[in-house]
Every structure is written in C-alpha cells, then in structure tokens.
C-alpha cells in the first residue's frame, strides 16, 4: 500500500516533533518536508530523522499550497498553539486538507462549524491519549445514564501541565460538561490550573523527569453533608501516549477520506470504536 503523506504542523514544538519522528519511522506514512510554525520562530528548518523540514510562517502559507499539490492525497496533524487553532482550521478547509487537531484552545464551536461547512473531515479531540479517552467515554456514558445524580455535590478540579502549556486543559474542560449533566454546579473558570514547576514537584509529586511534559488531573466530588467523597485521578507522564493516539487518528481519518466522507467531525471516541489501527 502506498504510504500516507502526512504534514505535521507546529514544529519545533515538542508534540509536533514527537509525532513527526513517529511518522518518519513508520512505513505506513511519508513525512512531508514542510511544517506550519509561528511568526515568532526564528529557525527556517528543522531536521527530523534525517529529513529537513522547512518551517513555514503564517505569511508564507500561500506559496506552500503549490508545493503540496503533487503530494496529495495527504493528511495534516496540528500541534501548534491555541491562538492559531481557528485560523489554521480555516486554512485547511479552504485548501481541502483533512486534519487531526491535537491542539487545544481556540473557539471550539467555530472550529467544528468550519469543518461541517467544508469539503473535508477532521478528528478533533481535547486529548489524544487512548486511556484517557476511554475514561472520558465512561464519564460521558454515566452523565447520560444518570443525569442529576450528583446534584448538590461540591466539585474541585485540578489540572497540572508543563509550564509552556498556555491554555486550560481541554480534558478538564470536557469533564466539566459531564459533571454539569450529573447535576454539579461548576464552570470552566473554577478549574485550578497549575503551571508552577515548584508546586508540581513539591506539592503534587510530579517526578522531576516529567516536569517539562506531563498531564495530571484530579476531580473530587464531596456530598452536601461532607460524609461522602469521590475522587478520580488520571496522571500521564511524558508525551508518547498522545503520539500513539495521534497515529491511530491518522489511520482512521485516512480511511474516512478514502470513503469520500466530507463535512464530518470525529472524536477520539470515534477513532477507538472504529478501530483506527491497521
């Protein structure tokens, strides 16, 4: 089978670099030697597994499209920045580039609407880690089956990520919606976001080796009279688990593209239930 051409946007960022290396080393894929990057990035080129990747700033995107024509059909992976999410999605839709959006933040409703009004499809997820996606699916199912079950309970959500993560955890924000359905009064603004390495190490116990790359979440429910406490925790050290999920999302989206599916937004729950691996 011909390898799937993949452009990984967001270099020289950590997640983009990890995904690019995985794509370059996987015989199912062919890494495209271009990557959209931010206007503040000084470098013009980054080498990934012996491949020189040209970094394309926002002002130079128009010239990129001509270079990509010979590489179609292709897929895009986006691990850029929350402030670039919607502009990038517009660019992908306008130029018929099916994409996997691993970047959190931006206007998510607008992001989804952009895809639905276009001739492309996309996998959009607040978390690409398959174990966490399964946990989210469990909570989503519970919220549907038992609406209002925790009415009156108090909720606290704490999320800790590396200092460079600019926005509140997309996973934590998604969980707020599930708890709301279960009757808990809580808003995204109530999430405690921790980015201080000292607090992460000394108070939370994040291992030194993963201060620069982790995702720790704890959700705690307390009954109105304080006699019942429920706590859910999922801690991820490192980034490889997100790379695994991203690769499955690429395979899943490639199948959808070959089937001619357009204007549809898929989640990682769709990817897992649809068996995105081959």
Image (cartoon, grey):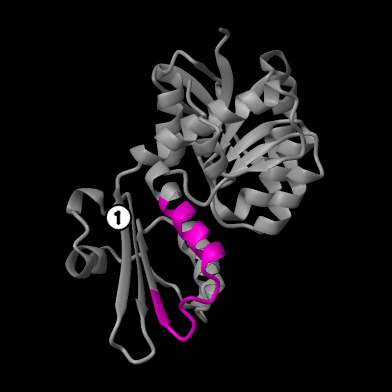
Q: Position of residue 209 (x, y in %)?
A: 20, 48
Vertical comparison of 39 with 255: above or below:
below
In the displayed image of the protein, which residue is found farthest to the top?
Answer: 1
Q: Residue at x 65, y 38 (%)?
A: 122
Left or right, 114 with reference to 31: right
Horizontal side of 122 relative to 3 (left or right) equals right
Residue ID for mark 1: 235
Is residue 166 visible to us here?
Answer: no
Q: Is residue 36 above or below residue 186?
A: above
Q: Quadrant of residue 96?
A: top right
Which residue in the rendered view is the most extreme toward the bottom? 225
Q: Is residue 35 visible?
A: yes
Q: Nearer the viewer, residue 259 or 208?
A: 259
- Neighbour tally class for label 1: few under 14, some 14-19, many 20 plus, Cα within 10 Å: some
Comparing 46 with 169, the one in front is 169
Left or right of residue 267: residue 20: left
Please indicate whether residue 83 sits to the left or right of residue 198 in the image.
right
SS state under label 1: strand
Q: Position of residue 119 (x, y in %)?
A: 80, 34
- For the image, the number of numbered tags is 1
Q: Compared with residue 58, is residue 160 higher up or lower down, i.e. above or below?
A: below
* Magenta region includes residue 146: yes
**Magenta residues, start to end:** 135-156
Q: Is residue 197 magenta?
A: no
């Amino acid at each position: 089978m011909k390898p799937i051409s993949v452009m990984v946007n967001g270099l020289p960022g950590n997640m983009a670099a990890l995904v690019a290396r995985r794509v370059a080393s996987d015989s199912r894929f062919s890494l495209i030697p271009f990557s959209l990057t931010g206007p503040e990035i000084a470098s013009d080129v980054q080498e990934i597994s012996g491949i020189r990747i040209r970094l394309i700033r926002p002002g130079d995107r128009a010239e990129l499209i001509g270079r990509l024509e010979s590489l179609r059909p292709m897929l895009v992976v986006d691990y850029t920045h929350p402030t670039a999410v919607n502009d990038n999605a517009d660019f992908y839709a306008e130029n018929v580039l099916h994409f996997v959006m691993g970047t959190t933040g931006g206007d998510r409703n607008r992001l989804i609407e952009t895809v639905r009004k276009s001739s492309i499809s996309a996998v959009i997820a607040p978390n690409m880690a398959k174990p966490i996606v399964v946990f989210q699916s469990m909570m989503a199912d519970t919220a549907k089956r038992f609406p209002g079950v925790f009415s009156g309970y108090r909720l606290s959500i704490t999320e800790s990520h590396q200092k460079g993560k600019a926005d509140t955890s997309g996973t934590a924000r998604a969980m707020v919606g599930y708890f709301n359905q279960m009757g808990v009064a809580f808003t995204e603004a109530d999430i405690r976001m921790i980015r201080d390495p000292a607090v992460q190490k000394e108070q939370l116990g994040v291992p030194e080796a993963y201060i620069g790359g982790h995702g720790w979440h704890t959700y705690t429910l307390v009954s109105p009279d304080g006699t019942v406490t429920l706590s859910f925790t999922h801690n991820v050290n490192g980034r490889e688990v997100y790379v695994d999920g991203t690769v499955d999302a690429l395979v899943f989206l490639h199948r959808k593209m070959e089937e001619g599916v357009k204007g549809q937004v898929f989640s990682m729950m769709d990817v897992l239930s649809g068996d995105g691996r081959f």
